[in-house]
Image (cartoon, rainbow, N blue to C red):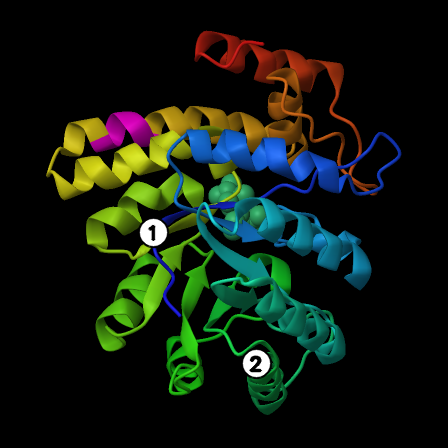
């Protein structure tokens, strides 16, 4: 099955005031994201606070998203977990729900050897029957797969590519050049232009929930050879990202969307509410850039 489109929002998970999941919030959030021209959704990943959720909560969010968005855009289900059993169960659900692909971080917390990691990915591919995108995010997963190891995993036909959330554009370009039949999506929003300039199959990120149109514009400007416009757009994103990195990326994005009337609620603990200073800083940017309530 094909994964069409190149610009994917790594979706937030709507929650109620008490931190329980709010599947009813998925439809308005999806509609807001798609109204900005984004091509698809990457569901239940880092931005979705998935590691703070039970398997059944994640399944509910995967299901609510598929029901609302299956006919509207490409869907990638992130099913990665510390446990192969949980990842496999979610992968099977994603297959039944009509997702276009699954994705997974390497199994985390324990330091697994490469054979264990490869076995985990094979089990996920078997369970979903869908193309599998490896989610490489060494800063959070604790596993830094080398170029050679990523290429070794991709010898399996079912492994369709990599979501690359790291900063090494040299490694990214090497991977893309060496495995031209696979898809490589860049996941560090603040450097999307760098990846687009060197060549990428697309971008998947957290800030695409709010400013997806900016990444669409970067991609179009690069394709047109308009580097000045591409830089202007990336600078706009980076002004926001610099603030989000101070106030908290997921909490800041949820605050911005709530303020625009897209109800996504708070983050789940141990994430704490934003400080008053953080709210003022972020509101100032939102007001000055066309995201006032
Ligand atoms: O992969 C996100 N990474 C993390 C996606 O969640 C760690 C990115 O979209 C970042 O949130 C973004 C801001 O640093 O680049």
Residue at 80 percent of width and 33 percent of height? 272
- In the rendered structure, the answer to whether residue 156 lies left or right of residue 183 reads right
Picture coordinates of residue 184 (x, y %)?
Answer: 35, 63
Question: Residue lying furthest bottom in this view?
Answer: 115
Image quarter of the C terminus: top right
Picture coordinates of residue 189 (x, y %)?
Answer: 43, 42
Please identify the quarter of the rendering in which residue 26 is found: top right
Magenta-span inclusion, residue 292:
no
Picture coordinates of residue 190 (x, y %)?
Answer: 41, 39
Note whether ligand 1 is within 8 Å of mark 2. no
Helix, strand or loop: magenta stretch: helix
Instruction: Kindly report which numbered mark, 2 or 1, lies closer to the viewer in this rendering.
Output: 1
- Tell me which label, 2 or 1, sits earlier in the chain: 1
Q: Is residue 176 visible?
A: yes
Label 1 element class: loop
Residue 5: which disc?
1
Residue at 57 percent of width and 30 percent of height? 244
Note whether ligand 1 is within 8 Å of mark 1. no
- The CA span between labels 2 and 1 is 24 Å
Depth check, front residue: 8 or 281: 8
Image quarter of the N terminus: bottom left
Q: Is residue 249 visible?
A: no
Say which residue label 2 marks. Answer: 121
Residue at 45 percent of width and 12 percent of height? 290
Task: Magenta stretch: give its range.
Answer: 230-234
């Amino acid at each position: 099955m094909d994964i069409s489109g190149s610009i994917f929002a790594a979706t937030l998970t709507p929650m109620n005031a008490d931190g329980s999941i709010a599947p009813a919030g998925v439809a308005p959030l999806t509609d807001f994201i798609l109204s900005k021209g984004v091509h698809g959704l990457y569901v239940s990943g880092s931005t979705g606070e998935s590691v703070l959720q039970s398997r059944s909560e994640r399944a509910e969010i995967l299901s609510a998203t598929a029901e609302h968005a299956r006919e509207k855009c490409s869907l990638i289900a992130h099913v990665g977990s510390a446990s192969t059993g949980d990842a496999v169960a979610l992968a099977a659900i994603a297959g039944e729900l009509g997702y276009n692909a699954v994705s997974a971080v390497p199994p985390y917390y324990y330091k697994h050897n490469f054979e264990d990691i490869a076995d985990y990915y094979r089990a996920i591919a078997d369970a979903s029957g869908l193309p599998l995108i490896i989610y490489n995010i060494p800063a959070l997963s604790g596993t830094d797969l080398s170029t050679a190891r990523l290429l070794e995993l991709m010898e399996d036909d079912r492994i369709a590519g990599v979501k690359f959330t790291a900063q090494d554009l040299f490694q990214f370009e090497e991977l893309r050049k060496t495995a031209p039949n696979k898809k490589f999506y860049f996941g560090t929003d603040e450097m999307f232009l760098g990846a687009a300039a060197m060549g990428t199959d697309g971008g998947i990120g957290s800030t695409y929930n709010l400013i997806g149109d900016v990444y669409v514009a970067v991609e179009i400007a690069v394709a047109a050879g308009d580097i000045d416009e591409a830089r202007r757009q990336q600078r706009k994103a980076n002004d926001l990202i610099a603030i989000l990195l101070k106030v908290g990326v997921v909490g800041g994005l949820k605050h911005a969307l709530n303020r625009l009337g897209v109800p996504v609620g708070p983050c789940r603990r141990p994430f704490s509410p934003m400080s008053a200073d953080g709210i003022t800083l972020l509101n100032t940017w939102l007001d000055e850039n066309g995201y006032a309530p």
